[in-house]
């Protein structure tokens, strides 16, 4: 293993000069810096992570908080997490993955321990109880007058949108526009009775941001277009979908359009429609908000708005790194939805 002393000898400088180049703690001339960096690259030197952290007061670690709840579609969460990890590596950071449902306690623990330079939070609720700590404004004072919020040099980015985004940096799909886009597509095809098969009830009970914003977009666009909309949450699996579909058709027997925002309900819905002799899209149309893979691998290729997991993870890291480098400002980045038309949507059937 190449040592710092060997890099110094190769570059013709002192070991302390190499250390200053690595830590950035002192100004080094451009020529000297270039010689040191060329020697580091040629010799394949990799600084010890612990020593580097001590020298720079940085851990070069990003904490990613991903509560893995049973009522969430875990593959999407993990796809975002992988995007965060791979993007972080390109910027020289490793990722500490926190999967528990600890809420503010996890924020305090990471902030107080110095485990990470910054954090990315997922599964954001409209009134998320982690947000006061991120803002550091209304947590009770600790002994000595210190607040248990984040240090000023330990920023955070949310993948998700709370009700109040002031003082925060957030990245998300524009779920409100997503809901509107789905209703608009079905309405343009002549569907006047549309049912929304939503996430599990607990997702709405927590007022999870993405689900609430999608529903808001669906309802607003339905009112604007004069479409009747019925929303029913649905648990995972065939049995839950069977109960939900029976309820929808009992309450709104003229339903011809479905919007599904629940990946685990997609295939059970298509199977139940087949069993009832309802052809897709001749009798009913189905539009989904789901990963591209779910849409194209369904038994009927689904018209869908894809979840841009890669982009969400990448943008979150890029904005966090900008903050760590002193370049970032608080912003809200909403990714515009794109609807891809496939085999599951078509003109509404003529009414008798």
Image (cartoon, helix red, strand yellow):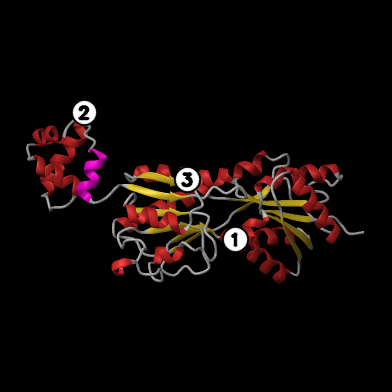
Label 2, residues with CA under 10 Å away: few <14, some 14-19, many ≥20:
few
Quarter of the image holding residue 35?
Answer: top left
Where does label 1 land, which residue? Answer: 206
Q: Which of marks 1 and 2 is nearer the N terminus?
A: 2
Location of residue 69 in the rendering, given as x and y in whole percent from the top left corner: 57, 49
Q: In this view, does 240 lie above or below 108?
A: above
Where does label 2 land, which residue? Answer: 1
**Predominant SS of the magenta segment:** helix
* Residue lying farthest to the right in this orientation: 352
Q: Is residue 345 magenta?
A: no
Q: In which quarter of the image is the C terminus?
A: bottom right
* Left or right of residue 263: residue 56: left
Residue at 31% in and 44% down: 92
Total marks in image: 3
**Label 3 – label 1 distance at C-alpha:** 22 Å
Of residues 233 and 340, the one nearer the viewer is: 233
Q: Is residue 66 above or below residue 211?
A: above
Please state which of the two labelled residues, at mark 3 or mark 1, is closer to the viewer: 1
**Label 1 – label 2 distance at C-alpha:** 51 Å
Instruction: Identify the magenta region.
Output: 48-56
* Left or right of residue 256: residue 79: left
Location of residue 223 in the rendering, given as x and y in whole percent from the top left corner: 71, 70
Q: Mark on residue 81? A: 3
Label 1, residues with CA under 10 Å away: few <14, some 14-19, many ≥20:
some
């Amino acid at each position: 293993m190449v040592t710092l002393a060997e890099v110094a000898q190769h570059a013709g400088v002192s070991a302390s000069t190499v250390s200053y180049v690595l830590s950035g703690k002192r100004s080094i001339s451009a020529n000297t810096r270039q010689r040191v960096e060329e020697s580091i690259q040629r010799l394949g030197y990799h600084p010890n992570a612990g020593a580097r952290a001590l020298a720079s007061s940085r851990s070069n670690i990003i904490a990613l908080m991903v509560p893995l709840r049973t009522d969430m579609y875990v593959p999407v969460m993990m796809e975002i997490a992988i995007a965060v990890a791979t993007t972080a590596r390109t910027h020289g950071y490793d990722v500490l993955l926190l999967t528990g449902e600890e809420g503010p306690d996890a924020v305090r623990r990471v902030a107080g321990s110095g485990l990470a330079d910054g954090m990315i939070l997922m599964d954001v609720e409209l009134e998320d109880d982690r947000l006061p700590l991120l803002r550091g404004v209304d947590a009770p004072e600790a002994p000595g007058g210190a607040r248990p919020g984040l240090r000023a040099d330990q920023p955070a980015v949310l993948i998700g949108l709370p009700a109040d985004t002031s003082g925060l940096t957030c990245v998300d799909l524009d779920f409100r526009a997503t809901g509107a886009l789905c209703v608009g597509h079905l309405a343009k095809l002549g569907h006047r009775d549309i049912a929304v098969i939503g996430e599990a009830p607990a997702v709405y009970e927590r007022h999870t941001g993405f689900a609430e914003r999608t529903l808001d977009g669906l309802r607003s666009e339905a009112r604007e277009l004069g479409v009747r909309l019925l929303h029913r949450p649905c648990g995972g699996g065939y049995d839950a979908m069977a109960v939900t579909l029976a309820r929808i058709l009992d309450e709104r027997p003229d339903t011809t359009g479905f919007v599904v925002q629940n990946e685990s309900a997609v295939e059970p819905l298509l199977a139940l429609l087949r069993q009832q002799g309802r052809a897709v899209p001749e009798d009913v149309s189905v539009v989904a908000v789901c990963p591209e893979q779910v849409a194209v691998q369904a038994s009927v290729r689904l018209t869908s708005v894809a979840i841009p997991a890669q982009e969400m993870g990448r943008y979150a890291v890029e904005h966090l790194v900008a903050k760590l480098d002193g370049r970032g400002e608080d912003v809200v980045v909403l990714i515009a939805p794109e609807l891809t038309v496939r085999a599951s949507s078509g003109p509404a059937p003529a009414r008798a």
